Image (cartoon, rainbow, N blue to C red):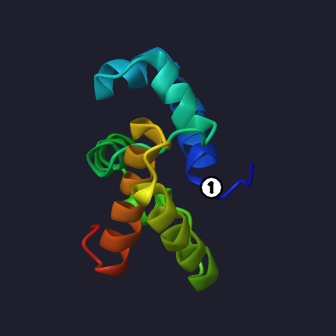
Amino acid sequence: MKKDDLGSKLKMLRKNKGITQDVIADLLGVSRGNVSHYESNSRTPSIKTIEKLASFYNVSTEFLLPSSDVDEVKELLSKAEEIFKSDSIPLEEKINLFNKLNVIYLKSQNLFK
């Protein structure tokens, strides 16, 4: 895990505040397990969740989101096309990818504060 990825930033901000994953889970209305997944980058939070976290930690959403280069975006879009066409991919994976694509789109449109 890189220090500038979303999960690392979320974990660092939480620890700097001296609070537990349970506190964040209550704030977001999710399980502690979800918070753990966010911090380990095994699950991507929704855009609304990222906005809540940014507000709670008093940081911008741009700070939380890792920068991505054009090759990463192209690769993600290619995978997205395959996944959305496949009936064998679980719905949860499709939703996770959709959330990642939303983040990239909104970031590119400068809709984040």
Residue at x 63%, y 81% (from the top left corner): 71
Q: Which residue is mark 1?
A: 5
x, y percent for residue 34:
47, 26
x, y percent for residue 112:
29, 67
Mark 1: which amino acid?
Answer: Asp
Count how many numbered circles sit on residues in the image: 1
The answer to whether 111 appears left or right of 37 in the picture is left
- Vertical placement of 102 versus 33: above or below? below
- Of all residues shown, which one is farthest toward the bottom? 70
- Of all residues shown, which one is farthest toward the front? 87
* Quarter of the view holding residue 98: bottom left
The secondary element bearing badge 1 is classed as loop
x, y percent for residue 68:
57, 73
x, y percent for residue 49:
32, 42
Report crowding for label 1: few under 14, some 14 to 19, many 20 or more residues within 10 A (C-alpha).
some
Work out which quarter of the rendered image holds the C terminus and state it: bottom left
Residue at x 57%, y 84% (from the top left corner): 70
Residue at x 33%, y 40% (from the top left corner): 56
* Quarter of the view holding residue 11: top right
